[in-house]
Amino acid sequence: MEPFTTLRSRTVVLPAANIDTDQIIPARYLTTTTRTGLGGNLFADWRYDAQGAPRADFALNRPEAQGCSILVAGRNFGCGSSREHAPWALYDYGLRAVVSTQIADIFRSNALKNGFLPVVVDEPTSAWLIAHPGADIALDVAAGTLTLPSGAAVEFPLEAFARHCLLHGVDELGYLLARGEEITAYERRR
Amino acid sequence: MASTPQTLFEKVWRAHEVSPESAATPAVLYIDLHLLHEVTSPQAFALLRERGISVRRPERALATMDHSIPTLTAQVFGGAPIAIDSAARQVRELEANCAEFGVELLGLQHAQRGIVHVIGPELGLTQPGKTIVCGDSHTSTHGALGALAFGIGTTEVAHVLATQCLLQSKPRTLGVNVHGRLRPGVTAKDLILAIIGRLGIAGGTGHVIEYRGETVRGLDMEERLTVCNMSIEAGARAGMIAPDETTFDYLARRPRAPQGAAFERALDEWRRLPTDTGARFDREVDFDAAAIEPMITYGTNPGMVIPIGGSVPAHGDDPAFAQALAYMGLTPGAAIKDQPVNVVFIGSCTNARLSDLRSAAAVLRGRHVAPGITMLVVPGSQDVKRQAEAEGLHQVFLDAGAQWRESGCSMCLGMNGDLVGAGQYAISTSNRNFEGRQGKGARTLLASPVTAAASAVRGRVTDPRELT
Ligand code: SF4
């Protein structure tokens, strides 16, 4: 995993609440056996029309959204299935963070394991961001802050261990493998 | 010294802490049973292979095939190739991965294959007090037997394969207390839909639910599985029900449950699991079962649910709500009853066990599905299929004009080609009505097996109490 320290980008906004993982990556694209290549089908049913052509009115397809790496979304982003294909698809597309007032548990856990930052902010901050697509904002993992164009910094929660893993590009598997003796001891004492 | 009263969840959690959570690190939680399927495992095995890691406890893993596999007999048992190439590839890949890593596989033609959340309990592998994970959010189902069971992502699948452990922050607890009697025609599916309708689809986020109260005690095991299955639809990763005589009776006949003296010893442990008197939940909510009607969804998430006699609500100027109704082609204020349907699906890990098929068949016996209706009945496992056939239920479905298939997830998520067409209405006993879930443009109405069967007969949304 690449270390994730800071990120500055314009935002792309999907204001809907409850964007579920079936929207992020519909089931019919879960046919891959690798982690990459899913970006093309990110939000497939919203992004493309029946003929497969990009829909000009979809936020990600607008010219000003190109190159944005921070997604702002409505409440309860990533609800639904446990498919890790959801953060894989977002990442593969070029997005690196999502900002919402609430993020579903399994999606959040999956996102953190793939260097994709789940940022939970308060209602007023979210409302401002949703009303200002393209806002130039900055995320700082060490400080746990989102900085608005005004310079105001808003804190977001991040567990100490998740922060450590992001900052150093550590993956949890290495950490767990290093606990092998403790695991063996546990297996013996049961 | 009297110890602090604990909840069922806390007891199971603590017993599985290899090391507890600290300010700097999450808990290392030991996993007793790891279930795998063909769609969320390939990248996990690939990760192990890349790093040259073997599976730490292959005997604690069991793989099966359910999500993308065909349900047409010829494609399952030979005679016809699997129509979807990518599904065929996932089947081959899981076979190869299980062989290479020494994981037991109940493969495509195995007599005990089925939807992963149906076969775990059915085989007796799902047991009280166990920690159970699977790369699938409906792993919450297994909590019905008093296990702590939750869905994980593919990276975590690799973690469990490699270390038999997961890094987890301790969730909060939510007690859902249900009192009173469910009325005739009102099922466990209606109960959980009503709970989700009240809690909201994010209401359980960060929590493990324990379903409690005399209504829950009175549910049989298959009904409890239906309830716990949809915990994730309220945002909770896990739902649990304290084990009791219903649980023990259910397990006593199961091939992979402890047998003989081992079963007696297990019983002693299982009886200690229920939440102690005086134990505290972080939150509690109460439900009156007698007030619950047969429920049906009208929108694009499971929280958008109303009693079957109700009308589609109006939500002022909320654009997301308006978009959901536009997708569904429904009008605020309109009755949901008598809404025409095109497809009826009886299946999924929510409602495809034997009791579900029996109740649907009871409605369909001597009746026929309405003209133009496509109806699929897909048993939850091959074992359910065999039992249903032994009772002649398949004949009831076939005589009524429904299709009778091999087991699998099928139209619940439409990965295998069992799809609902764009703009069509499907009344479905599954658990998700998200946009496109059953096919691009498909409009899903979630309901119980009896509501689905009654609606198949009339060709429109029907209160099952009108047909019994
Ligand atoms: S039946 Fe549906 S919800 Fe259940 S495991 Fe299969 S796809 Fe998931």
Image (cartoon, grey):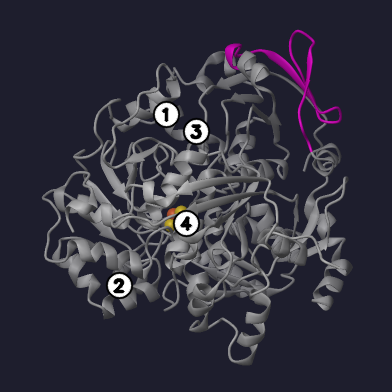
Q: Give residue B227's mark.
A: 4
Q: Please state if B403 lies on the left or on the right of B262 as rendered.
A: left
**Same-subunit check for callouts 4 and 3:** no
Residue under label 1: A48
Query: Mark 1 and mark 4, same subunit?
Result: no
Q: What element carries label 3?
A: loop
* Badge 4 element: helix
Amino acid tagged 1:
Tyr
Label 2: how many residues lie within 10 Å, few (<14), some (14-19) or many (20+)?
A: few
How far apart are the two marked residues, 4 and 2, measured between alpha carbons? 38 Å
- On the same chain, marks 4 and 2? The answer is yes
Magenta span has A147? yes
- Residue appearing at x 68%, y 53% in the figure: B155
Q: Where is residue B221 in the image (x, y as percent from the top left)?
A: 46, 68
Amino acid at the residue labelled 4: Val
Residue B133: x percent and y percent? 62, 61
Taking depth in this image into account, of A71 and A120 the one nearest to the observer is: A120
- Name the residue: 45% across, 77% down: B112
Q: In which quarter of the image is residue B323?
A: top left
Q: Distance between the residues labelled 1 and 4?
A: 36 Å
User: Is B259 situated above or below A63?
Assistant: below
Which residue is depicted at the point 83% across and 46% down?
A170
Q: Is residue B359 magenta?
A: no
Q: What stretch is highlighted in magenta?
A: A130-158
Give the mark, 4 or 2, whose residue is nearer the N terminus. Answer: 2
Cα distance, mark 1 to mark 2? 37 Å
Q: Mark 3 points at which residue?
A: A43
Q: Can residue A25 be seen in this view?
A: no
Q: Is residue A120 left or right of residue A46?
A: right
Q: Are marks 1 and 3 in contact (CB under 8 Å)?
A: no
> Is residue B123 in sight in this rendering?
yes
